[in-house]
Image (tube, rainbow, N blue to C red):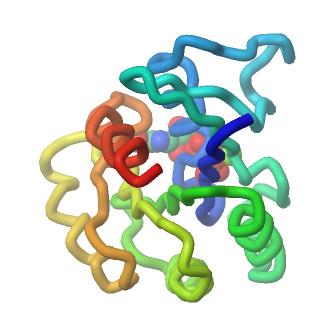
């Protein structure tokens, strides 16, 4: 299976959209066996000859806006157990939430390599919002738009660099 990257974050930040973007449009090997990519949780990515697996952990827990902290804890603990590297997705249109702070604290303690992904940067205007994510204490936030694909190449460069 090789290296495993896990996508974590609170509901509706765009984890599944990012998963689909990274596995469909950038990959040599795409698993379409499920018939629909909607519920697919595992995929392969080949980026510049470096291959890794990616898991959308959002499918592991209830996906609703009023998700409990305990469910997020489960998601994050599983990711920490299984993954070599973690993509922590936050929402640049929404800014930092209490749940983001909570997840950031667990991730900081885990000492896993974490890449902070500020999603929904659909235009340059949203770039101004990204700086507030420095407060999460996880280094530089990577601005992306999972919908448009903006920033995903730079993000994959960083993923591969950290592997
Ligand atoms: P998840 O719950 O974290 O897996 O989030 P989803 O991938 O299901 O996305 C939640 C909502 O955010 C959906 O309506 C997506 O279309 C939207 N979304 C995801 N990525 C982006 C993005 O880059 N820009 C914008 N504007 N919306 C996005
Ligand atoms: Mg999802």
Up/down of 136 relative to 7, above or below: below
28 relative position to 37: left or right:
left
Residue 68's spot in the image, x, y percent? 79, 78
State the image quarter where residue 132 is shown.
Answer: bottom left
Residue drawn at the location 75% of the way across and 82% of the way down: 69
State the image quarter where residue 71 is shown.
Answer: bottom right
Q: State the count of labels.
A: 0
Front position in the image: 113 or 19:
113
Residue drawn at the location 38% of the way across and 38% of the way down: 156
Front position in the image: 52 or 138:
52
Instruction: Pick the quarter of the image with the N terminus.
Output: top right
Up/down of 49 relative to 41, above or below: above
State the image quarter where residue 93 is shown.
Answer: bottom left
Residue 151's spot in the image, x, y percent? 27, 39
Residue drawn at the location 60% of the way across and 48% of the way down: 5
Residue 67's spot in the image, x, y percent? 76, 71
Front position in the image: 1 or 32:
1
Up/down of 79 relative to 46, above or below: below
89 relative position to 11: left or right:
left
Residue 84's spot in the image, x, y percent? 61, 57
Residue drawn at the location 42% of the way across and 61% of the way down: 115
């Amino acid at each position: 299976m090789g290296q495993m990257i896990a996508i974590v974050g609170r509901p509706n930040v765009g984890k599944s959209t990012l998963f689909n973007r990274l596995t469909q449009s950038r990959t040599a090997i795409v698993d379409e066996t499920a018939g629909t990519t909607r519920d697919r949780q595992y995929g392969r990515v080949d980026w510049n000859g470096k291959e890794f697996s990616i898991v959308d952990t959002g499918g592991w827990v209830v996906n609703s806006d009023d998700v409990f902290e305990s469910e997020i804890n489960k998601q994050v603990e599983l990711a920490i157990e299984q993954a070599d590297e973690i993509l922590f997705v936050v929402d640049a249109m929404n800014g930092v939430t209490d749940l983001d702070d909570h997840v950031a604290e667990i991730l900081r303690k885990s000492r896993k390599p974490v890449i902070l992904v500020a999603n929904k940067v659909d235009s340059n205007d949203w770039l101004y919002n990204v700086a507030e994510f420095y407060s999460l204490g996880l280094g530089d936030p990577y601005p992306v738009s999972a919908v448009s694909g903006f920033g995903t190449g730079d993000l994959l460069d960083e993923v591969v660099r950290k592997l």
